[in-house]
Structures are given as C-alpha cells and as structure tokens.
Image (tube, rainbow, N blue to C red):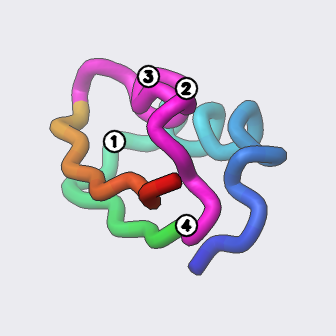
Amino acid sequence: NVRGLRTKTVEFYSSVASVEYDAICITETWLYEDMDSWHLFDDRYLVYRKDRGS
C-alpha cells in the first residue's frame, strides 16, 4: 500500500512519465472512483483498478 497516493499525484505522475516502465503495480486503500486514472498514468498504460466502495 503506497499510503497517501492522493496527496502525491504530481510526484507520482512525474516519476511514471519520466521512465518507460513495462509494468507498475500499486495498491492504495483510499483511492476512490472520483480520482480518474489519467491523474496517475498517461495513455501509454492500460490501467486495471478496483475502487473502494462507499
């Protein structure tokens, strides 16, 4: 669990955009559906997610 990804989106996106990773796997307990995947990943990545229910 990355703990606090919602407060570190700019740093995370910059890191992901600067290197071409083959795969990125993260878990974030507090990630809700109101945060779109494009906040975290650019269009090079196919995102699979299971959002927390309310």
Residue 9: say if magenta: no
Mark closest to the chain's N terminus, 2 or 1: 1
How crowded pointer 2 is (Cα within 10 Å; few <14, some 14-19, many 20+) is rated as few
Mark number displayed over residue 38 = 3
Measuring 24% from the left and 42% from the top, which residue is drawn there?
Answer: 47
Label 2 close to label 1 by CB (< 8 Å): no
Mark closest to the chain's N terminus, 2 or 4: 4
Instruction: Tell whether 26 sits left or right of 32.
Output: left
Distance from the alpha carbon under mark 2 to that under mark 4: 14 Å
Measuring 43% from the left and 57% from the top, which residue is drawn there?
Answer: 53
Q: How many marks?
A: 4
Q: Nearer the viewer, residue 30 or 48?
A: 30
Label 2 close to label 3 by CB (< 8 Å): yes
Numbered disc in front, either 1 or 3 = 3
Label 1 close to label 3 by CB (< 8 Å): no
Point out residue 25 in the picture as x, y percentages from the top left corner. Answer: 34, 67
Mark closest to the chain's N terminus, 1 or 3: 1
Residue at mark 1? 20
Mark number displayed over residue 4 = none
Measuring 46% from the left and 26% from the top, which residue is drawn there?
Answer: 36
Instruction: Tell whether 48 sits left or right of 37.
Output: left
Point out residue 54 in the picture as x, y percentages from the top left corner. Answer: 52, 53
Distance from the alpha carbon under mark 1 to that under mark 3: 16 Å
> Which residue type does callout 3 highlight?
Trp
Mark 3: secondary structure: helix
Residue at mark 2? 39
Mark 1: secondary structure: loop
> Which residue type does callout 4 highlight?
Glu
Q: Which residues are magenta?
A: 29-44
